[in-house]
Image (cartoon, grey):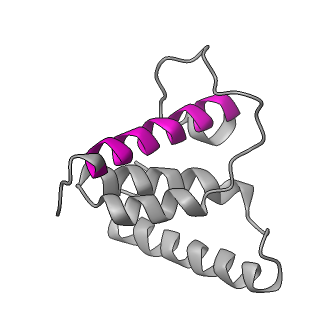
Amino acid sequence: LVLSTKESLLAYERTEAYEWAKRQGNVNASFRSFQPFKLIYAMILADNDKYDRADLFLKSIRLPYMKETPDDIKSVKVEQLFDNTSAFVLAYHQVRKQIESNEKHGIKY
């Protein structure tokens, strides 16, 4: 399972530090292969009612260019986040809606 162990979370934190360092030289720099991990981490945070932190991770994600939100996919599996652009974008928007709906209700953690 992705990001389900202490070791995998530590490795994830290192990738975040690596991308941050890269962005110091180029604000638009990102690593495409890291983006699904950011989304999964934001999902974990949102599922644990940490909406503010989840929102920060969503804002740091570089979405692939797409003209519109995909309508052909109804649900997403974790594996699809790594190789299916439409699934990645759909999952991103689902997490965004989850965060926004809970922020509107004033839920605190």
Residue 48 lies in quadrant: bottom left
Q: Is residue 8 above or below residue 101?
A: below
Identify the residue at image location x=34%, y=70%: 6
Closer-to-camera residue (17/70): 70
Q: Is residue 12 above or below residue 62?
A: below
Where does residue 98 sit, x and y in percent of width and height?
Answer: 35, 41
The answer to whether 22 appears left or right of 5 in the picture is right
Q: Is residue 82 above or below residue 12?
A: above
Where does residue 23 sit, x and y in percent of width and height?
Answer: 74, 78
Outermost residue, right side: 26
Residue 90 lies in quadrant: top right
Where does residue 39 sit, x and y in percent of width and height?
Answer: 51, 51
Identify the residue at image location x=45%, y=35%: 94
Where does residue 10 sit, x and y in percent of width and height?
Answer: 44, 75
Q: Is residue 21 above or below residue 97?
A: below
The answer to whether 12 appears left or right of 109 in the picture is right
Q: Quadrant of the C terminus?
A: bottom left
Task: Name the magenta segment's main secondary structure.
Answer: helix
Q: Which portion, as a residue range, is magenta?
A: 85-103
The answer to whether 105 appears left or right of 63 in the picture is left
